[in-house]
Amino acid sequence: MIRIGWDDLRLPGFASRMLAGSTLRLAVTGLSRAGKSVFITALIHDLLAFPRLPQRLPLLGAMDDLAGRVVGVDIALPVEPGVPTFPFDRNLRAMAADPPRWPEGTRDVAEIALDIRFRPTGFLHRSDSEATLRLVIVDYPGEWLLDLPMLDRSFADWSADMLAMARQGGRAAAAADWLAFLDAHPATAAHDDLVAERAADLYRAYLVRCRDEFGMAYLQPGRFLQPGDWTDATLLHFCPLPPGGGGGSLGATMAGRFEAYKRAARERFFDRYFRRFDRQIVLVDLLQALHAGQAAFADTTRALTDIAGAFRVGGGLLARLFGSRIGRVLYAATKADHVPGMQRDHLRHLLSTMLRAPMLDADSRGADTAAMAIASVRCTEDDEAVLDGRPTPVVRGVPLTGYRQVKFFPGTIPIRPPAADDRFWGRPFFAMPRFQPPRLDPDAASGIGHIGLDEALDFLLADRLR
Ligand SMILES: Nc1nc2c(ncn2[C@@H]2O[C@H](COP(=O)(O)OP(=O)(O)O)[C@@H](O)[C@H]2O)c(=O)[nH]1
Ligand SMILES: [Mg+2]
């Protein structure tokens, strides 16, 4: 396989890049609890251990014998003043405690950088020459990506869509208080700050219930659920409204705030970050979405499809509006250690079926997109149990609230989304417990067991370590 083409050699920056080192910005996202913090913590831990313990990541750069060429991996000093540092040490301490704990949640953008020193391959390089890849990892809440479909819509259009959704199915019950308040306070009424704040609070409460009680994912605006450093009332005190209301009305004020929110999302987040990302991984807790039922699964599918559309390399919204150069996108179904071997293949297959339309489109434009099933921190082992007289694959792990190993029968994962009337949705089909993490070695001497982290890293960065 040819590693260095003549086109590369003609690039003016090529030589200096190889000598001085280059930077790869990897963006990590996913909805709250998708597994971002655990993923980043585990990948740093295993990369730090890689020079001494490459067998923890056997597929990372296996084709190029990366294990024999990585000389050292270190955490680099903070790169970007003003951006919070990803709390790797704090997470490591939690997972190395006795008993080990999962890292705490985070609610804002965070960055961390690793310097990977390696010996490049290829005829240009003497075997003792060394290059450095600075891997900058940026963690940001996936909730904010769900603002994208808002950006090119008017307040009236967006409101009509959100109100229609709020009156349907399981959402209607969660929306009752908010909708009743809107009936009592029409858009045409004179603006009153307290009324606007109350309406926004009730709308936010509805979004929170949709997320927590029904496992919904298609929830806008994203900052209502994950505000980050946004505190400004004029950005957050609005909600969808029926049409109506001239100057000085509640309707006019909220329409103005909607526009201010969109401007702020563009300037403070999309413009600021997306131009600089090189690679993106989108983490999805697909098992949880399946577990939560048909409505939640449909909602997750819609969110995922919109996100995948936005990341479409070349033609996606992020490239068009924000000059994103992201050239590789990996979609990963997380926590795959909840299901035994064969079901993990199903999980991967299900995710790629869900993504097929946007991925095919991306492929035709020369982009690199992939779907995988991973467990950043493997908490279970595959086992067997006898069910109805037949041996059945199960997983074995310690539940978060327990102290000894228990077997879980996770049920069968479909390889394509079951139809709305499929019997699959009619029964409690698998267990979705929280497991206790294995205790981590704080010195990174032994790395940490995972499923598929090496394959994910191989896809995301191995080509930059040649
Ligand atoms: N069994 C298992 N559970 C995981 C794994 N990754 C995350 N989790 C669980 O998911 C929770 C949320 O993960 P976290 O990384 O904090 O999510 P974030 O909100 O996206 O940063 C953790 O507290 C764990 O309970 C994994 O690889 N295996
Ligand atoms: Mg987190």
Image (cartoon, rainbow, N blue to C red):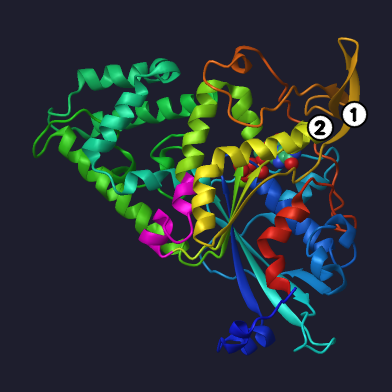
Say what amino acid the circle numbered 2 marks.
Pro
> Would you say 11 lies left or right of 437 here?
left
371 w.r.t. 318: above or below: above
> Would you say 252 lies left or right of 355 here?
left
Look at the magenta stretch and give its main secondary structure: helix
Taking depth in this image into account, of 386 and 150 the one nearest to the observer is 386
331 w.r.t. 184: above or below: below
Dot 1 falls on a residue whose secondary structure is strand
Report x, y in % for residue 268.
Answer: 39, 58
Q: Residues within 10 Å of mark 2 (few under 14, many from 20)?
A: many
Taking depth in this image into account, of 317 and 243 the one nearest to the observer is 317
Marks 1 & 2, CB-CB < 8 Å contact? yes
CA separation in Å, label 1 and label 2 = 8 Å
Residue occupied by mark 2: 340
Q: Which mark is residue 383?
A: 1
Report x, y in % for residue 333.
Answer: 66, 41
Dot 2 falls on a residue whose secondary structure is loop
Report x, y in % for residue 25.
Answer: 59, 66
Q: Which mark is residue 34?
A: none
Which quadrant of the figure has residue 242? Answer: top left
